[in-house]
Amino acid sequence: MSLRKISRALLSVSDKTGLVDFARGLSALGVELVSTGGTRKALADAGLAARDVSDLTGFPEMLDGRVKTLHPRVHAGILAIRDNPLHQAVMRQHELPFIDLVVVNLYPFEQTVARTGSTHEEIVENIDIGGPSMIRGAAKNYHDVAVIVEPADYEPLLKELRESGGTSLETRERLAAKAYARTGAYDAAISTYFARKLGEPFAPTLNLSFRRQWKLRYGENPHQHAAFYVEPSAAHVCVANAEVLQGKELSYNNLLDLDSALNLVREFDEAAAVVLKHNNPCGAAVASNLAEAFQRAWDGDPLSAFGGILGFNREVDEATAARIVADKRFVECAIAPGFSPTALEILKAKENMRLLRTGPIGPSPASFDYRRVDGGLLVQERDLSGDDMKNAKGVTKREPTRQERIDLVFAWKVCKHVKSNAIVMAKDGMVVGVGAGQMSRVDAVQAAAKKAGDKAQGSALASDAFFPFPDNVHEAAKVGVTAIIQPGGSKKDNESIAACDEHGMAMVFTGVRHFRH
């Protein structure tokens, strides 16, 4: 019979959210409660009777609580197979009690690591030993034992017990899968901590743990199934932690674009807005206020902006919201630190438009990028350097003017977020043309020039990698580009410099490449 009655439950939790109500519900159903130190005290304070685990084992908690549940009377009660006559005989011979439900959430190791000021000793003390052992034992014996590792499962389990008198095999198997996922994530966090402590950012074995946040309607295309997983320890401002305020369910492609939009606007100290399309910025601008920045970002390429993703680095105010809904613009999503109450009211006119609030945006934190390849995983540091211009140097006869230098820096920051080969043309703090994902750099220059049209006149151009030939300079000069920023490092740099001098253009080398494949 797959239904299993619960007669005895062992509760040992660090996170006591919902504990008392859950224990009260179990007690009302006639379940004997067994618990450890802090958990037992919480239950006793609430007026609930709970047998101390020391009474069960015959041994006191010892070594400052390091040893309390690591005992045969605990683990035999968890691991004994109820339908196995030999197991039953051993349990009777040694008068061992069965444990039908294990409720454990682990010492807060991840939170201790993430907390500023935690010492190595504190972190090590928050490595749980007995908890994972009980969880794994109960999960292994899921045919007979139920295991709970998070408070979200308290009420569903009580509901099943009240309605059915026991737990179903399906429930126990589901809880076991969740339990192993938790212990796996816990061990991954510990191994990652020690690898970093030993100065090994790229450890010999990489253990990653992500928690499913949403099942998505589909992936990049409707025939692909998809889901969104998040890092449990991610506490910084990012798409994973953003609050969805309105709109339809987010899609796989929405999330990719929202992430790109957020990472681009956080590059700027000034009020900035960006329009993303197919994971490339088709418009971006900075201005004295957000409404103007948005308008200039949209006007950079209004044709491509249709159906785009918006990113902002300031709270969206009434004026900006009014411009978003003007002229019946079709916008998929917008992500921003916040939306004023008036702005939210205005944006209700676009009820299907997804709005995400991040809270105050700071710089991107140092972390890793992961990319799946068939049979493996590529891991690298995030591209966060090379934008302060400390090592940038003019290489042409003419130095950039003050305004050209401002536009070069702006274009350079945007170019980092464009798929390579990447070219960005900008003027007066506004993107006027983008050439993205081209197989040759001169094609990218020509694509950006075509997008820019007359707005290319007097613009600054950024290239994510060096010019292999001077033809790029000549193409830029044709449409009126007056200044160029690029990494340099080509064997033909001298020819590109000479071409700039020929056209009276300024050029700056950064010494840093920004490929984004």
Image (cartoon, grey):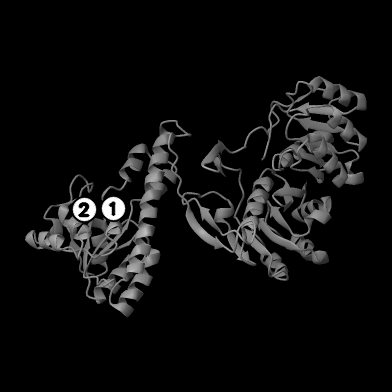
At label 1, the amino acid type is Gly
Which of the numbered marks, if any, corresponds to residue 465?
Answer: none
Relative to residue 34, is residue 392 depicted above or below? above
- Which of the two discs, 1 and 2, labels the residue nearer the N terminus? 2
Q: Which residue is denoted by mark 1 in the rendering?
A: 131
Q: Is residue 450 visible?
A: yes
Q: Residues within 10 Å of mark 2 (few under 14, many from 20)?
A: many
Relative to residue 288, is residue 323 depicted above or below? below
Label 2 secondary element: loop
Label 1 secondary element: helix
Q: Quadrant of residue 154?
A: bottom left
The quadrant the C terminus occupies is top right
The quadrant the N terminus occupies is bottom left
Q: Which residue is denoted by mark 2 in the rendering?
A: 69
Q: Residues within 10 Å of mark 1 (few under 14, many from 20)?
A: many
Q: Is residue 378 left or right of residue 506?
A: left
- Give percent across and percent down for residue 6: 24, 70
Q: Cβ–Cβ below 8 Å for labels 1 and 2?
A: yes
